[in-house]
Structures are given as structure tokens and as C-alpha cells.
Image (cartoon, helix red, strand yellow):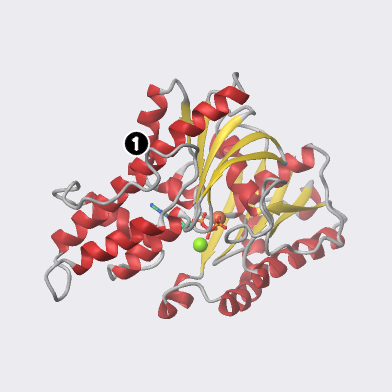
Amino acid sequence: VKILGIETSCDETAASVITDEGEGEARILSNVVLSQLDEHRPYGGVVPEIAARSHLDHIDRIVDEAMDEAGVSFAELDGIAATGGPGLIGGVIVGVMTAKAIALTHKLPFIAVNHLEGHALTVRLTDQVAFPYLLLLVSGGHCQILAVEGVGKYKRLGTTIDDALGEAFDKSAKLLGLGYPGGPHVEKAAAKATNPARFKLPSPMKGKPGCDFSFSGLKTAVRQAAEALPPGPFKEEDLNDLCASFQMAAADSLINRCKNAIKMFKADYPEGNTLVVAGGVAANQTIRTQLTGMCEKQNMRMVAPPLKLCTDNGAMIAWAGLEAFKAGKIDDLTFAPRPRWPLDPDAPKAAFAGG
Ligand code: ATP
Ligand code: MG
Ligand code: FE
């Protein structure tokens, strides 16, 4: 089975062709990602209107590139998948319309993919991971722990009561004068720290029952620590230590919340033994290492996608589309893009940031 996947829900225009033949990254026949970073940089964040126009300008070329690189013709595809939400609606419309047009022209099935399900299932593209598994989804807009029972079957165990972790990385980076997106900048600075334990920052929710998260207090603590430094531009040494202290506090909070989640998960699914970490923040090496260590102690296996599949890309959408296709879940061309689209059916109506 071969699927073309299109991702346009935020600020990367991405397309990829994948197959379920072979193993590991060899299944990725192409994976083209065009970042709009330069276009949004002057504004210090993603501007929805600019994003939508940019997706429209580039999507045809990116799809052509993905097809060329894969060396596959439309006739050889089994289906076209596109992110159907959640995300910035202008971009989602561009991706969905493009996919529908290709599907109609070439008489191929169209599959609308939940962007979060793309993050959730990507590990199964490159690794052997069976259902059920426990999923820590840490991205720019989401911070959730879910039990993944199968394609389209999710049970939420915990979520953030305020900011997502990627958002906390981005906001902390911004107030420290680092670039956007903040995660990679914070990670780089933290790696150069000489005293990562220098700033005593809170590990939010640590010790509380359940597995909900909170990160806005940590971001505030970073701001207060920064304000307490000598006036004038930050010294690099201070910046590095503060980034490292932030990263450790965040990892510490994740570990504590995941320990509780593992207990809850094992009670419901005694056969489950895997924690999957996915979403942009899963690209963070310190967080990966800390979670791996915790899992070893809990008799769990920790799996995270290869670094370049953690942040948004087309391969994750193609793969989730392939899994849905194989499960017989094909969408009608009347599918309407969804700005909000929670993974779990019981999600509260006023869910956070799209989820
Ligand atoms: P969502 O998937 O929730 O809709 P999104 O698609 O915008 O949001 P992703 O692309 O999955 O988010 O992830 C982007 C986020 O990941 C940003 O907040 C970014 O700072 C963070 N991130 C990326 N790389 C790293 C890293 N190395 N360390 C920490 N955070 C990172
Ligand atoms: Mg992005
Ligand atoms: Fe994402």
C-alpha cells in the first residue's frame, strides 16, 4: 500500500509518500517539508493569514516534489491523506482541497487525518509497536496522556490545565530573547550550561494525584528568575543555566506525571508495556533520556519517533492515513475541515487549543 500525505495545519507545508512494505525509515519514499519560519519571524509567532497564503503558494510544488522524489505516479497510489484538523483553519482548507482535487482527478480514496493521530501513530511507521500503548503527546498545542487502543480509539488519562509544553518552551525562549520556535534554541543553550541545577524552578503538579499537567507557572518562574538577574543583556552563562534548569524542571514534571499514568494504564491494560512519546517536544534529547530512564525502572519500553518525524511532517499524516485506509476508514469528498478535533470522544467541549 502506498499513500501520499499532506500536512498544512500550522507553519510547515509538507508532503510525503510512504509505503507499508519494508522496514523502518525505508518505508518513507519521500518526505518534503517547507518551513514558513522566515515569513513569520518578523512577527515573533505564526500569523494565520500569512500561513494560509503561503500554503496556497507552495502546496502544488511541494506535492510534485514529494511524488518526483518517491518516483511514484498518482496511478500507483492507493490513497491521498491530508490533515483535516485540528489546526489553523486556512491552512487545513488548503491541504484538504488539494488532496480532494487529486483524489477526484485520479479516482483515488481520500482520507482526512486528525493531525494528533498523525503524531500518535508515527512510531508504528518506523518501529514495531503494538496496541495498546500509553502515549505522551507533547507538542506546540497539546500536552496529553492517552491510552491508544487502536486506530481512532483513544482514551484520555490526563491533559494540561493551562499551557502545552511546547508552548512553555516557546514562551520561555521568547522572554529570554531566543528565537522561534523556542524548543531547539532552549535545548541548544541548555546543552552548554555549566550549572544546570543553579535556578530552583518548580516542577509543576509534582506529587499531585492523576496525570494532568500545568506549565504556565514554570514559565512565570523563568520570567521571575530572568528578572532577578543583573540588568542589561543576559550573560550567556546565565542564559544557558536558566534554560537547563527549565528543561530539567519540565522533564521532572513529565516523569512524575507519567509514573502515575503508567499505574493507571497498567490497571486497565495489563498487557500494555510501551510508553510512546510523540509531538515536537519529543525531539528534545534530555526529555527522551529522562523518560527512557524512568521507563526502565517501571518495566516499560520507551519509544519515540526519529527526531525529524517528531515535529510536523507529511510522513506522519501519510502513515495515519495508511492505517485508516487499511482499517477501511475512507472519507467522503464532502468532509469539512475541523479547526477543533479531539482524539478522544469524551473530551470536554471547551477543550484547549484545538484538542
Ligand atoms: P500540535 O501538534 O499540538 O497541533 P504543532 O503541530 O504546532 O502543535 P509540533 O510541530 O508537533 O506542534 O511541535 C512544535 C513544538 O515543539 C514547538 O512548541 C517547539 O518549540 C517544540 N519543539 C521542537 N523541537 C524541540 C526540542 N528539541 N525541544 C523542545 N521542544 C521542541
Ligand atoms: Mg511548526
Ligand atoms: Fe503537530
Q: Which residue in the rendered view is the most extreme toward the left?
A: 230
* For residue 37, above or below residue 241: below
| Residue 147 figure quarter | top right
Q: Residue at x 75, y 64 (%)?
A: 337
- Say left or right for 162 vs 156: left
Q: Residue 119, position in %: x, y?
A: 58, 47
| Residue 52 figure quarter | bottom right
- Say left or right for 236 vs 175: left
* For residue 11, above or below residue 204: below
Mark 1 Cα shell of 10 Å, populated few (<14), some (14-19), many (≥20): some
Q: Residue at x 67, y 49 (%)?
A: 347
Residue toward you, 253 or 317: 253
Q: Residue 307, position in %: x, y?
A: 44, 46
Residue type indicated by callout 1:
Gln
Q: Looking at the figure, which quarter contains the N terminus?
A: top right
User: How many numbered discs sit on the rendered protein?
Assistant: 1
Residue toward you, 66 or 96: 96
Q: Which residue in the rendered view is the most extreme toward the front?
A: 208
Q: Residue 33, position in %: x, y?
A: 54, 60
Q: Residue at x 51, y 70 (%)?
A: 36
* For residue 97, above or below residue 259: below
Q: Which residue is mark 1?
A: 290
Q: Looking at the figure, which quarter contains the C terminus?
A: bottom right
Label 1 residue SS = helix
The answer to whether mark 1 is within 8 Å of ligand 1 is: no
Q: Residue 47, position in %: x, y?
A: 53, 76
* For residue 156, above or below residue 238: above
